[in-house]
Image (spheres, rainbow, N blue to C red):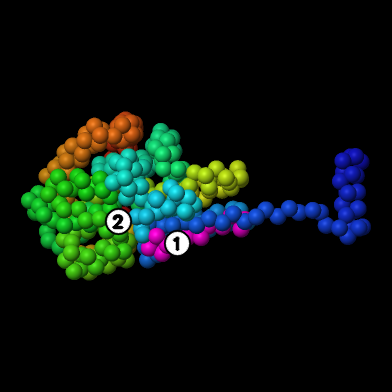
Amino acid sequence: MDRRFILRHAGIAGVLATGAAPAVHAQPVVRWRLVSSFPKSLDTIYGAGEVFAQAVRAMSNGRFDIQVHAGGELLPAFGVLDAVQTGAMEVAHTAPYYFYAKHPAFALGSAIPFGFNARQMSAWMLHGNGRKLMNEFYAGYNIVSFAGGNTGTQMGGWYLKELRTLADFKGLKMRLGGGLAGEVMSRLGVVPVDLPGGETYQALRNGTIDAAEWIGPHDDQKLGLHKAASYYYYPGWWEGGPEMDFYIHRKAFDALSAEHKAIVQGAAAIAHADMLGKYDARNPTALKQLVAAKTRVQPFSQTVMDAAFRASLEVFADNDARSPEWKKIYADMRNFQRDQILWFRFAESRYDTYLSAQKI
């Protein structure tokens, strides 16, 4: 008989004979707080924070607990970056472009006008230089980032009046989610208004704003935006594939064990994939319901799209001139995007265009 087998079982017999239990050193539970930029009412985008926390809890057998707080619960929706940067909170779930006013490079971690779609964004982050470049930039804010979901290409917003020409944008007060989109829209004559999603319906309803964009049919319906405006335009050319992120305080992350770091990374990947899947599953039903409720769904004209594209390039050139961080990351992003557009043109685009004309 194997000697190791005898010794091992002799040891067990000895423990049983004496009634003593093997020494167990319980590890203390790691407790973090996650602050979201989104209200609980928006189950899909806010829900990614809950999915993340639940996955961390499950994979750690309860030894790593993250409490999730909705936007406005502990902090204002746009106050989460400062809280994580200072270490007041361990993690935030947010849209990086919300912080464009702090530095234009934040937008590159989420979405820019006429940027990536959702799949291209993930490709750049995972297998291009995206995550590396963004985390180098975030290091200046004591943050490490992980992807925290994507909405897919968004809709172009709700308008009180029909947009017949470019002149209809002049003086339009519009809620926009990111400062970069607002900067581009302002070149079309729009007056950008920065509001959290939860405040958008009331502002549109009482006429404080003339137009508003949020995400897409599922969330827009939940916010009741169709009850305040009739015209629903597409596509949201400023948000082709906006990535949400988990921002984690660098020292808090570095203090984790290797096991817990791997759990964070795995849980973020689960939440990231789950969000996009939910939006793709839920938006079609919501869109049909909105149309049944007399929403007028209309495309932006080619003239509007071309003018927006030209205005976007002007803003990008300005950012190149004023920010070396933006210039470095933006150049890498565009180089990667050129090949992505080439590939999608041959397979995805032709496939989708064909199917959209068929009756299934």
Magenta span contains residue 344: no
Secondary structure type for disc 1: strand
Compute the Cα span from label 1 to label 2. Answer: 21 Å
Q: Closest to the observer: 158 or 26?
A: 26
Tell me if label 1 and label 2 are in contact, CB under 8 Å. Answer: no
Quarter holding the N terminus is top right
Q: Nearer the viewer, mark 1 or mark 2?
A: 1
Left or right of residue 57: residue 275:
left
* Residue at screen point 10% across, 52% down: 170
Task: Give the numbered dot on residue 87.
Answer: none
Above or below — where is 157 with respect to 307?
Answer: below
* Residue at screen point 70% across, 55% down: 26
Dividing the picture into quadrants, the one containing residue 174 is bottom left
Q: Closest to the observer: 92 or 351?
A: 92
Q: Which three-letter amino acid code belongs to the residue tagged 2?
A: Ile
Above or below — where is 259 with respect to 75?
Answer: above
Q: Which three-letter amino acid code belongs to the residue tagged 1?
A: His
* Residue at screen point 41% across, 57% down: 36
Which residue is the site of mark 1?
A: 69
Q: Residues within 10 Å of mark 2 (few under 14, many from 20)?
A: many
Which residue is the site of mark 2?
A: 215
Q: Residues within 10 Å of mark 1 (few under 14, many from 20)?
A: many
The boundaries of the magenta stretch are 62-75
The picture places residue 294, in percent across and down from the top left corner, at: 19, 67
Magenta span contains residue 68: yes
The picture places residue 175, in percent across and down from the top left corner, at: 22, 57
